[in-house]
Image (spheres, rainbow, N blue to C red):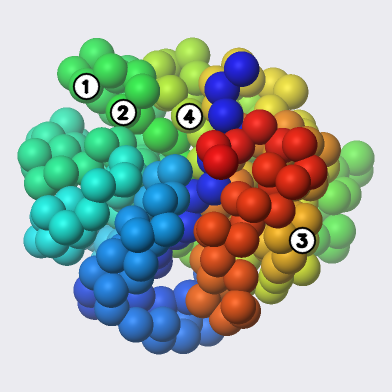
């Protein structure tokens, strides 16, 4: 059985690290290279680096920070933001990324997923699925409480159902799904287990759950009750005294199959 993973995330804005609440209200949290060095020293399973304004600004990810992190840190590195072509991916992978995370580009051009899988292997291709719960007002009969996929950093609704879109991404060649609850992002109020479970039960590829981790037990709940292969978090590591080392020990002590 594959071990469950703890994945810190670094969100970038103008090459500074920020943290959001529901994909807005950005707060500066320091230099990403400093954080990456700390996480590397703590032997994290993987690190996610996401340029959160690249898609909104219709530009590619700034690859220089990827090169800087990869030169000094040795954990697997997944990077994303504004990726729209095989060439974009090739550049980031040449700078030291191990995986690429695609969201808006994949929704706008589904064939990009398959092209990337053929070019670099499915294990390199992570499809990000950012989800909001639809408000009750204005919905058609029977739609209350349903979820919807959003792109461009949560700014644009797609009309896509996250379960159906995740299945499509898998069929096209995605190796993993990175699932984020926009409603829980930065709130530290707990993961949306119902959302996570719905995706996990609909695909056979690993699902990384994100959005809402506020306690160490949230990692366990996401992995055991949600069924996630990994849980990604940021606020708990930035704004509390918890760390990936403490999270890993907490999970080991409770019998969760993580790297000790």
Which residue is located at x 16 percent, y 58 percent? 72
Residue 188 drawn above or below residue 87 = below
Real-space CA distance between mark 3 and mark 1, rounded to the nearest whole angstrom: 34 Å
Label 3 crowd (10 A; few <14 / some 14-19 / many >=20): many
Q: Tag 4 or tag 2, which sits nearer the N-term?
A: 2
Whether tag 1 and tag 2 are in contact, CB under 8 A, the answer is: yes
Real-space CA distance between mark 1 and mark 4, rounded to the nearest whole angstrom: 14 Å
Q: Nearer the viewer, residue 151 or 142?
A: 151
User: Residue 124 shows which numbered tag?
Assistant: 2
Residue 195 seen in the current view: no
Real-space CA distance between mark 2 and mark 4, rounded to the nearest whole angstrom: 9 Å
Q: Measured from the top left, where is residue 21 in percent x and y?
A: 59, 75
The answer to which image quadrant residue 39 occupies is bottom left
Q: Measured from the top left, where is residue 15 in percent x and y?
A: 23, 73
Real-space CA distance between mark 1 and mark 2, rounded to the nearest whole angstrom: 6 Å
Whether tag 3 and tag 1 are in contact, CB under 8 A, the answer is: no
Residue 73 drawn above or below residue 229 = below
Residue 30 seen in the current view: yes
Q: Tag 4 or tag 1, which sits nearer the N-term?
A: 1
Q: Measured from the top left, where is residue 31 in percent x and y?
A: 28, 78
In the picture, the quarter occupied by the N terminus is: top right
Q: Tag 3 or tag 4, which sits nearer the N-term?
A: 4
The answer to which image quadrant residue 167 occupies is top right
Which residue is located at x 61 percent, y 70 percent? 242
The residue that label 1 is drawn on is 120
Whether tag 3 and tag 2 are in contact, CB under 8 A, the answer is: no
The residue that label 4 is drawn on is 176
- Say whether residue 68 is left or right of residue 104: left
Q: Secondary structure at mark 2?
A: helix
């Amino acid at each position: 059985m594959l071990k469950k993973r703890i994945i810190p995330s670094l969100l970038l804005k103008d090459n500074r690290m920020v943290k959001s609440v529901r994909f807005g209200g950005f707060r500066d949290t320091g230099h990403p290279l400093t954080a990456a060095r700390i996480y590397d020293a703590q032997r994290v399973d993987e690190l996610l680096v996401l340029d959160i304004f690249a898609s909104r600004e219709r530009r590619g990810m700034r690859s220089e920070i990827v090169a800087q992190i990869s030169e000094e840190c040795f954990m697997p590195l997944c990077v994303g933001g504004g990726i729209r072509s095989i060439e974009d991916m090739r550049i980031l992978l040449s700078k030291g990324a191990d995986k690429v995370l695609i969201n808006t580009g994949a929704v706008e051009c589904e064939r990009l997923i398959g092209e990337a899988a053929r070019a670099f292997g499915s294990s390199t291709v992570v499809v990000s699925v950012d989800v909001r719960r639809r408000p009750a007002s204005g919905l058609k009969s029977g739609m209350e409480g349903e979820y919807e996929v959003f792109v461009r950093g949560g700014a644009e609704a797609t009309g896509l159902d996250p379960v159906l879109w995740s299945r499509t991404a898998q069929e096209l060649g995605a190796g993993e799904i990175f699932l984020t609850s926009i409603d829980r992002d930065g709130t530290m109020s707990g993961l949306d287990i119902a959302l996570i479970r719905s995706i996990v039960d609909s695909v056979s590829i690993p699902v990384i759950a994100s959005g809402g981790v506020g306690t160490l037990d949230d990692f366990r709940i996401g992995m055991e009750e949600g069924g996630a292969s990994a849980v990604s978090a940021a606020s708990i590591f930035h704004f509390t005294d918890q760390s990936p080392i403490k999270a890993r020990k907490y999970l080991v002590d409770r019998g969760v199959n993580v790297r000790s």
